Amino acid sequence: MTQDKQSPMSAAEVNFDGLVGLTHNYAGLSFGNVASTSNKSQAANPKLAALQGLKKMKALADSGFKQGILPPQERPCIRTLRQLGFSGTDAQVLAQAAQQAPEILTAVSSASSMWVANAATVSPSADTQDRRVHFTVANLNNKLHRAIEAETTGNALRSIFPDPDHFAHHAALPQQAVMGDEGAANHNRLCQHYGAAGVEVFVYGRQVYGGRAEPKRYPARQTREASQAIARLHQLDPARTVFVQQNPGVIDQGVFHNDVIAVSNGPVLFHHQEAFLNSSAVFAEIHAKLAAVGGAFIPIEVPGSQVSVADAVNTYLFNSQLLTKPDGKMLIVVPQEAREHEGVWRYLSELIQHGGPIDEVQVFNLRESMRNGGGPACLRLRVVLNDAEIQATNPHVMMNDDVYRTLTNWVETHYRDRLSESDLADPQLLLENQTALDELTRILHLGSIYPFQR
């Protein structure tokens, strides 16, 4: 494959958003995620959550941004319950789990796969030695409810990106703490243009072998060892790869992933002052490596005096989407919570009037997702594709007017508008999930990606 295929003008970033699943509920499963634990046991509205997500996808597609869709998981995950010793019919399995191990039932019923920023790490073909787009499914082994996602996530990605001439798919890293991997939520890519060679920045919370600084209150989910393994699998050039440690102090304040404290797009890294350890040395390394491929690094640092870490966590200011518009300027997509916070909104208003690369802000109501600890950036997986790769991608998962209408009707037909933890043992909920997902795989032309279909 020639380098001409990687022309900066022939590549685009496609955001693949996760559809919210039918079992969207507030079980407070994610220790270290303040929003998740603080809203535990409240009733959720899966239908509203899914419609809010679809509305964001459609609005961005209507604005000219390429937008795709990733499917939810089958939940409750009966196969996992059977692996754990529950037996009988599916209804009996659910009843046993509800009686004997209700915490396990809530874990296998989680709809957290909606946050596809954790689905995988993706490296575009401009960065990889074999000039293919590489995907490594995240093992998410810090949390049981997420560690069971990898197989179906891999099935979905292979169905959406099927051509081995363009796409390379890697299984999740070993399910062991040394290789804790949380996907793209801890990965940034900096580049001058999407199709040009870039610098991939892996952010980790702890280094198992030889590391020192670690958080004390909440777990560091991503390891340096896992990030290094992914860089090797993706055939990345060490001269264009950077590993940086997240500040343990911000992890202990609820910054469970890097995308809660920093977001990148093109040459811009929008980040909080306290996001990283040894940031001066790391930024110098990024600057030098990006300059070597003709890029100019543009860090935008938000001072703690203007936006505290607590305010960043509560509003998910940094769990935003940075999107490049046709004029080369950037749009920042934020949740309604950022608009409602006086200090954060003041900062954003000043930012877009400052004359820098970010000159527009767009606000979305994603309250159902936010209450469970996920903002706009959690809901999307970023995949840079050139023209040939876009042609090789399953076209049925790309958002347009017809897909939006079809999926909106699908949600209205199949989703409940109220769900609490006590509903998870209802065998009818499982049947509703399987019926809906079977129909969804036909709508999106995904084939048989779920265990119940095999």
Image (cartoon, rainbow, N blue to C red):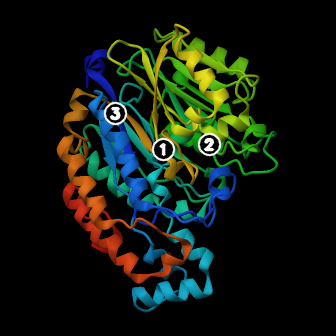
Q: Nearer the viewer, mark 1 or mark 3?
A: 3
SS type, badge 2: loop
In front of the other: 425 or 72: 425
Proximity of marks 2 and 1: CB atoms separated by less than 8 Å? yes
Q: Is residue 132 left or right of residue 243?
A: left
In front of the other: 191 or 77: 77
Residue 59 in the image, given as x and y percentages of width and height? 32, 35
Please name the residue shown 34% across and 40% down the image.
Answer: 57
Proximity of marks 2 and 3: CB atoms separated by less than 8 Å? no
> Which label was assigned to residue 90?
none
In front of the other: 159 or 381: 381
| For marks 2 and 1 on the same chain, the one whose residue lies earlier in the sequence | 1
Please, what is the three-letter code of the amino acid marked with disc 3? Leu
Q: Which residue is mark 3?
A: 60
Label 2: few (<14), some or many (≥20) within 10 Å?
many
Please name the residue shown 61% across and 82% down the image.
Answer: 101
Label 3: few (<14), some or many (≥20) within 10 Å?
some
Q: CA distance from mark 2 to mark 3?
A: 24 Å
> Which label was assigned to residue 117?
1
Q: Is residue 205 left or right of residue 15?
A: right
> Which label was assigned to residue 257?
2
Residue 253 in the image, given as x and y percentages of width and height? 75, 43
Q: CA distance from mark 1 to mark 3?
A: 17 Å
Answer whether residue 373 is visible to the viewer in this image: yes
Please, what is the three-letter code of the amino acid marked with disc 1? Ala
SS type, badge 1: helix
Residue 18 in the image, given as x and y percentages of width and height? 39, 49
Please identify the quarter of the rendering in which residue 238 is found: top right
SS type, badge 3: helix
